[in-house]
Structure formats: structure tokens, C-alpha cells
Image (cartoon, rainbow, N blue to C red):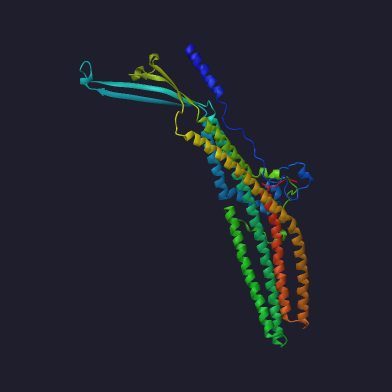
């Protein structure tokens, strides 16, 4: 009885000691970037960090919302990322199970014939042994080796989840950007079609005046050149629109209804504003930065597992069952049997393998620190670039709108002067080309401004509420 009581005390002590680990205490590295993003105001300097917004609050256009919902439900890249995260989650559960005892059961029959020459009475006989037992084994995590491996697997799982979230945010931004590009190309196609119609009308007028001996053959050829150039532009933008639609359908993983596709940028509902006056600490919530930090934590606890390899391991194995030479006697009380095998293993000489393992774990932690800092620096650069462009796009838009208005007047006056016989058709030609180019540039700037809002949502890790 004393022996059993002592055994229980020893096992209890081992259980109590098994909660410690040899991992270094984790300390988040300082962010190697300025404390504020470009343009941060007093509110940001005070350290007030607003919360993130769901994408539905950022996207206000119902058609684009529907497209994004379809993409999130069917996109294969996102599906693969989510499944990969689940695989890592299963690996974490496998590692976590190592902390607990394993149990099993077995039944066996062992029979053999003994020849008469080996029997004491010279008669051959058959020997049989029936065995039914249950067994359990457990490694006592005395120095936290298994716990460190479990924490490492958990951090890797959390990193994979953040990778899935980064894929989701990138997918939302890519969908919105492609949808907006489709709207811009459709608008440019409309401009080209309008220009083609105008040029065809001008050509018809010049052909009539040429027949009357007023317009020259050069005017006719120049007008025909403009018509063909406009027709080529229509065909080019028609191709762009088809490519944009195909890109959207690839993202969505299925076809999209025509009523969900925009006809021009003017009908696109604006995105909800994203706060710009922010401290750089908001970048620490970006999924890719969080994933890098979880990988850093995993590398940190791996040092504890490497350190524990220097120390002894204790494993307990026990079995309880029934054994009998006859099946009819197997379940009698006298058939009971048990076995208990505690085992202590300690490393003595490994030719420097343990030291190298620990050093590799430390170097892996240092590399993870550098990767984490690099992730923050990349995030800061992306946010800074997006915010800087945001400040200049507004001025560019105003200037381009004024240019388009001026060129529209120039084109109108050139046509009037040509019809009055004051100028040649060349002035009309130059004015029309300049106007079309300026209109295309204006569409491009409006697209860039909208895509800048989408990109700001992405680089801030899913948008920040105002």
C-alpha cells in the first residue's frame, strides 16, 4: 500500500512540474518606422487608434457588394488558403494531443504445438495462451518540451489564419479594382463610340462640301483618318471590356449577371472614406504583420523545446488485463495481470547535435524578428505611398477637368471657324484629338482616385473607421 501511495505522490509531483517551459519570455520588437503615418494630425498623435470596419461598410455600391459576396463564396485561391489553414489547425491538434496519455486495448491468442521429443512424458501437446489487456502510455512533460511544441503549433495555426484573412482582404481589393477598371474601360468605349459618331457626321458633311467644290481632298482624307482612328479605339476598348469581365468572372469562379456590371464610372457609388490621420501602430493589425508576429512567437517557443532536449525525459507505460491458458478460464479472478514500466532517458553524448539544434532555434528566432520588422516596413511604405498619392490626385482631377472644359470650347470654336472658311480642317483635327486624349486622361484619373481609396482600405488591413 505504501508503495502505491508513493507512486501516486511521485506522479502528482511530475504533473505539477509539467506546467513550466524553458522558452524565453516573448517581447514584441519595437516597430522600425516613424510613430505616425504621413499626414497624421493631432488625433493620431494622441495615440487614439480607431477600430476596423467590415468591408460592407466600406463598399456602398450594391452591385459591387453582390459581386464581392460571389467572389468570397466561390474564389478558389481563398478556398485553398482556408483549407491550408485548416490543415495547420489539424497539425496543432495532433501536437496538443501529445500532452495527454494514450490508451488502447488488445486481445491475442498464442498457440503452438510442442513435439513429443521436447515433452517430459514424450507425448506431443498443444500449448495455448489467451490475453486481453488495456494499456496506456504517457510522456511526463517535466521541462515543458511538449508544451513548447504545442504553443509553436498554435502560433503557426494563428499565422495561417491571418494569412487567410490577408488573402480575403486582397481579394476584396482586387475585385473592387477590376470592377472599377471595367467601368473605366466601358466609359472609354462610350467616349470612343461618341467620337466615332461625331467623326462620321463630320465626314458626311465634308463629302457634301467636297462634291460642291468647297472642301479639298485633303480635308476628306483627314476626316476619313479620324473616322478610322475612332473605329479602332472602339474596337480596342471593346476588347478591354471583355478582358475585364473575364478577369472578374475568374475571381468570382462563376459567371456574373450583366446587371451587376457597371457601364461607366459616373454611376459608381462612392466608397466610404477611410481615415488618413492615423498613427503607424494601426499597421500592426494588418493580417500579414500579425502573421509575421505569430511566426516570431512560434520561433521563440521553439527555443524552449530545443533547450528541453538537454534534459531527461520521463515516460510512464502501464497495462492491465487478463491472461489464461484456456479461453473458459480467461475471465476468472485468478487470470488478472498488470504491468507498470516507468522509464527515464537522458542524453549523454550527441556529438554537438543538441547545441546545434538550440543555436538553430535562436537563429530562427532572430530571422523571424527581421521578417517581422520587414513586414512592418513594407506596410508603412505601402500606406505612405497610398496616402501621398491621395493628396495629389484631387489637384490632378481639378486640373484635368478644367483642361477638358477648355478643349471642348477649343473644339467647338475650331469647328465654327472651319465651317466659316477661316481655318483648315487640320485645326479641327488637332482640337478633336486633344479633346479625346484629355477625356481619356480624365477617366484614368477618376479611376486612379477610386482605386486609391480601395488600395488604402487594403494597405490599412481592411480599413479604419473614422
Q: Give the quarter of the image for residue 263.
A: bottom right
Q: Nearer the viewer, residue 39 or 197?
A: 39
Residue pictured at 50% horizontal, 36% vertical: 357
Q: Is residue 360 above or below residue 455?
A: above
Q: Is residue 379 above or below residue 110?
A: below
Residue pictured at 63% horizontal, 44% vertical: 373
* Count of numbered marks: 0
**Left-right relation of 214 to 112:** right
Residue farthest to the bottom, as pictured = 213
Asked if one can make out residue 174 in the rendered structure from this viewpoint, the answer is yes
Q: Give the quarter of the image for residue 267.
A: bottom right
Residue pictured at 54% horizontal, 23% vertical: 15
Find residue 320 and report its horizontal and vertical position in percent.
Answer: 43, 20
Q: Give the quarter of the image for residue 194.
A: bottom right
Asked if one can make out residue 52 in the rendered structure from this viewpoint, the answer is no
Q: Is residue 146 above or below residue 50?
A: above
**Left-right relation of 259 to 358:** right
Find residue 202 and report its horizontal and vertical position in percent.
Answer: 71, 78
Find residue 310 and report its horizontal and vertical position in percent.
Answer: 50, 29
Residue pictured at 64% horizontal, 72% vertical: 231
Q: Nearer the viewer, residue 62 or 387?
A: 387
**Left-right relation of 372 to 328:** right
Amino acid at each position: 500500500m505504501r508503495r502505491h501511495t508513493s507512486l501516486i505522490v511521485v506522479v502528482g509531483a511530475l504533473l505539477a512540474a509539467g506546467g513550466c517551459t524553458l522558452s524565453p519570455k516573448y517581447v514584441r520588437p519595437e516597430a522600425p518606422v516613424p510613430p505616425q503615418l504621413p499626414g497624421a494630425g493631432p488625433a493620431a498623435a494622441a495615440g487614439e487608434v480607431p477600430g476596423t470596419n467590415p468591408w460592407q461598410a466600406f463598399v456602398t455600391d450594391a452591385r459591387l457588394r453582390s459581386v464581392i459576396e460571389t467572389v468570397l463564396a466561390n474564389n478558389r485561391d481563398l478556398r485553398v488558403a482556408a483549407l491550408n489553414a485548416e490543415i495547420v489547425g489539424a497539425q496543432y491538434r495532433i501536437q496538443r494531443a501529445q500532452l495527454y496519455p494514450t490508451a488502447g486495448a488488445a486481445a491475442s491468442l498464442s498457440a503452438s504445438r510442442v513435439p513429443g521429443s521436447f515433452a517430459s512424458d514424450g507425448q506431443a501437446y498443444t500449448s495455448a495462451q489467451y490475453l486481453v489487456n488495456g494499456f496506456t502510455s504517457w510522456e511526463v512533460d517535466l521541462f515543458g518540451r511538449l508544451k513548447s511544441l504545442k504553443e509553436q503549433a498554435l502560433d503557426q495555426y494563428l499565422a495561417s489564419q491571418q494569412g487567410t484573412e490577408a488573402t480575403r482582404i486582397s481579394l476584396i481589393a482586387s475585385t473592387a479594382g477590376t470592377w472599377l477598371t471595367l467601368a473605366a474601360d466601358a466609359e472609354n468605349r462610350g467616349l470612343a463610340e461618341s467620337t466615332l459618331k461625331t467623326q462620321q457626321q463630320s465626314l458626311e458633311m465634308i463629302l457634301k462640301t467636297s462634291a460642291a467644290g468647297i472642301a479639298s481632298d485633303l480635308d476628306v482624307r483627314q476626316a476619313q483618318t479620324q473616322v478610322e482612328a475612332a473605329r479602332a479605339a472602339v474596337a480596342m476598348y471593346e476588347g478591354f471590356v471583355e478582358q475585364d469581365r473575364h478577369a472578374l468572372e475568374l475571381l468570382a469562379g462563376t459567371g456574373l449577371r450583366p446587371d451587376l456590371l457597371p457601364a461607366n464610372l459616373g454611376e459608381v457609388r462612392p466608397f466610404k472614406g477611410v481615415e488618413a490621420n492615423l498613427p503607424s501602430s494601426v499597421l500592426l493589425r494588418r493580417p500579414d504583420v500579425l502573421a509575421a508576429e505569430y511566426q516570431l512567437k512560434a520561433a521563440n517557443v521553439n527555443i524552449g523545446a530545443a533547450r528541453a532536449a538537454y534534459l531527461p525525459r520521463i515516460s510512464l507505460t502501464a497495462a492491465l488485463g487478463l491472461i489464461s491458458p484456456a479461453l473458459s478460464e480467461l475471465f476468472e479472478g485468478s487470470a488478472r495481470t498488470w504491468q507498470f514500466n516507468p522509464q527515464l532517458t537522458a542524453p549523454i553524448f550527441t556529438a554537438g547535435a543538441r547545441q546545434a539544434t538550440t543555436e538553430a532555434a535562436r537563429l530562427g528566432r532572430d530571422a523571424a524578428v527581421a521578417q517581422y520588422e520587414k513586414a512592418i516596413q513594407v506596410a508603412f511604405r505601402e500606406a505612405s505611398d497610398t496616402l501621398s498619392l491621395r493628396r495629389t490626385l484631387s489637384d490632378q482631377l481639378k486640373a484635368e477637368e478644367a483642361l477638358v472644359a477648355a478643349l471642348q470650347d477649343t473644339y467647338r470654336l475650331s469647328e465654327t471657324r472651319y465651317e466659316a472658311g477661316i481655318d483648315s480642317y487640320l485645326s479641327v483635327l488637332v482640337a478633336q484629338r486633344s479633346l479625346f486624349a484629355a477625356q481619356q486622361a480624365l477617366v484614368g484619373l477618376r479611376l486612379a482616385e477610386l482605386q486609391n481609396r480601395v488600395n488604402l482600405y487594403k494597405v490599412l488591413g481592411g480599413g479604419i473607421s473614422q
